[in-house]
Amino acid sequence: MTKVLVVEDEPLALERVVRFLKEGGYQSFETAQSVQEALQKLRSYKPDVLILDIKLPDGYGLQVAKEALLEEKPPAVIFTTAYQDYAVDAFKLNAVDYLLKPFTKEEFLSAMDKALSKREQNKQVVDNFLKKINYIIPVKMGTTVILLSPEDIYYIKAEAGEVEIRTKEGFYPLSKKLYELEEILKPYNFFKVHRSYLVNLNKVARLKSGEQSKYRIFFKDIEETIETSREGAKNLREFFDI
C-alpha cells in the first residue's frame, strides 16, 4: 500500500488534497502542518510519496525535500503551491511535479501516477544494484562447486580459448568468455589491461613502467606479476590520470 505524507498548513487546501487522495483510492496517509512536524513524520512514517506546500509557518517545504533526499529510500516529491518562483529549486531537488494552486483532481492524480512510476523505477535501479553487489561466480572443480565473490579474484586470464580465475588459493577454470566477465565485473573495479587479462584493481599493489610504454602489474598477497599491453597501459594512465 502506498504511504503518502501531505505537508500543508492551510486547512482548506489540506482538506482538498486529502479528498483527492481518497477519491483516487489512496487510503494510507499522514498529514503535517509545519517543517518540524513534517521532518518528524518523514523519519517515523517513511512515506512513498511526499506532497509539499512551499511556504510553511516555520520555513519552506524545500527544506523538507532536501532532508527527504537523505533518506535510505527517498520518497517521490510533489510540490503544491500558489507560488511560481520556486519551480526551478523544486526540480533541482528531483521533484516529480510542481502543481500550482488551484489544481484539478485530474492534475493531482496524474502527478501521483508520475510519483509512483518514478518510485518503481528507483526500486528497479536499487534491485539491479543489489543483484550486482551480491554477484557470485560458481566454478566447478570435479564434483565440487566453489562459489567465488568478485573480491576473491586477483585477475582473470584467457588463453587458448580457456578462461581461468586467479584467487589467493590458485587457479579455477570457468566456462565463460572474457568479454562477458568484463561487462559483469565492471562495477567491481575490474579493468581489461590486455586482450587476455582482466584485473581486479582493488588487488593491485603497484604498477611499474616497462618496455614499449607497458606496465608490469604487482598484486597484493601473491607473488606473480602480469604485463599489460600498450593499449591497456594507455587506458590505465587515462583511468588513473597519471
Image (cartoon, rainbow, N blue to C red):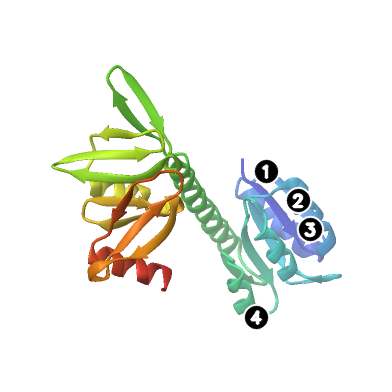
When the figure is inspected, residue 238 is found, relative to residue 202, above or below; the finding is: below
Q: Nearer the viewer, mark 2 or mark 1?
A: 2
Residue 77 location (% of width, % of height): 63, 61
Q: How far apart are the two marked residues, 4 and 3, measured between alpha carbons?
A: 22 Å
* Observer-nearest of 93 and 141: 141
Q: How far apart are the two marked residues, 2 and 3, measured between alpha carbons?
A: 9 Å
The answer to whether residue 34 of the structure is visible from this angle is no
Q: Amino acid at mark 1?
A: Gln
* Observer-nearest of 88 and 112: 88
Q: How far apart are the two marked residues, 1 and 3, measured between alpha carbons?
A: 19 Å
Question: Residue 43 — which label?
Answer: 2
| Quadrant of the rendered image containing residue 153 | top left
| Quadrant of the rendered image containing residue 135 | top left
Question: Residue 38 — which label?
Answer: 3
Q: Residue at x 73, y 57 (%)?
A: 6
Q: Residues within 10 Å of mark 2 (few under 14, many from 20)?
A: few
**Horizontal side of residue 82 vs 153, given as left or right:** right
What is the secondary structure assignment of the residue under circle 1? loop
Q: Amino acid at mark 3?
A: Ala
Mark 1 / mark 3, whichever is N-terminal: 1
Q: Residue at x 27, y 70 (%)?
A: 213
Residue under label 4: 84
Q: Residues within 10 Å of mark 3 (few under 14, many from 20)?
A: many
* Observer-nearest of 54 and 134: 134
Q: Amino acid at mark 4?
A: Gln
